[in-house]
Image (cartoon, rainbow, N blue to C red):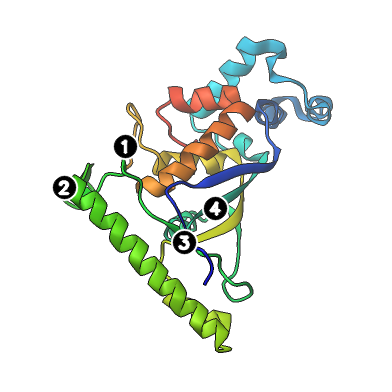
Amino acid sequence: MSDIIFRSDVTVELVRSSASDSDVLFAARVSTQGEQTLEAAAAHVDASEDEKKSKGLINYLMRDRHGSPFEHNSMTFYVQAPIFVFREFMRHRIASYNEESGRYKQLDPVFYVPGSDRNLIQVGKAGHYEFLPGTAEQTALVEQETRTTSQQAYESYQRMLEAGVAREVARIVLPLNIYSSMYVTMNSRALMNFLSLRTKREGTHFPSFPQREIEMCAEKMEEFWAELMPYTYDAFNQNGRVAP
């Protein structure tokens, strides 16, 4: 029996990117300057050359929702998270995904168990839920039951594999809290749409109430993006975190 690992976190790594504020600027300026923008595009001119003008243009595009200039860039993330998080992720049909396959490889015994700071009580009606901390007894129960059922499920999975059952059949007993991994690639406009729905922030024009586990992924992705495209990131926040 393989040793079972329990985690309460997610992994997000930026593995490749071609994304900067200058990508937004040359794409926007082609509408008025045409081929004059070619040199800047080829040279990846730093947006800070004229900081005030660059920030102003990006803010204008964001405010008035001229979204296409924010699509001329790319970020590829590697994500490790429970499978139930991936099922929410892939509802966003604005990215490209490749996930590890339980048909072709034996899944590792790594399972998610909520951390002690994870809110457990759901109050309110659909669309207006509020999540509150659980009691010490509820927290202990969640951890105990999650660990027990995960171990039992993985033992069943291994018994079937050892008996020669195909991986694609044996995996059906595994719970949604088993970890998977994937690459996800998107541009900044798509990422802004994702963040607007999968993070909860004060002052947003359209409040969202994401499940905490996918918000954990979104927060890590946002940190990488903020470093790559600081002017765009600031404009996103200043204009209510609405994707243009």
Q: Tag on residue 194?
A: none
In whole angstroms, how far apart are the C-alphas of marks 2 and 3?
25 Å
Q: Residue at x 57, y 52 (%)?
A: 95
The residue under label 3 is 83
Label 3 crowding class (10 Å Cα cut-off): few <14, some 14-19, many 20+?
A: some
Label 1 crowding class (10 Å Cα cut-off): few <14, some 14-19, many 20+?
A: some
- Asked whether, in this view, residue 160 is left or right of residue 52, the answer is left
Position of residue 72 measured from the top left corner of the image (x, y, whole percent) = 67, 39
Callout 4 touching callout 3 (CB < 8 Å): no
> Based on the displayed image, in which of its 4 quarters is residue 238 positioned?
top left
Q: What residue type is labelled 4?
A: Gln
Q: Which amino acid does label 2 sit on?
A: Val
Callout 3 touching callout 1 (CB < 8 Å): no
Q: Which of marks 2 and 3 is nearer the N terminus?
A: 3
Q: Which of 13 and 106 is in front in this view?
A: 106
Q: What element carries label 2?
A: strand
Q: What element carries label 4?
A: strand
Q: Which of marks 2 and 1 is nearer the N terminus?
A: 2
Position of 20 relative to 209 (above/below):
above
Q: Earlier in the sequence, mark 2 or mark 4?
A: 4
Q: What residue type is labelled 1?
A: Pro
Q: Nearer the viewer, residue 199 or 5?
A: 5
Nearer the observer: mark 4 or 1; the answer is 4
The residue under label 2 is 123
The residue under label 1 is 207
Q: What residue type is labelled 3?
A: Ile
Q: Tag on residue 80?
A: 4
Q: Earlier in the sequence, mark 4 or mark 1?
A: 4
Position of residue 126 measured from the top left corner of the image (x, y, whole percent) = 21, 53
Position of 118 relative to 149 (above/below):
above
> Based on the displayed image, in which of its 4 quarters is residue 52 positioned?
top right
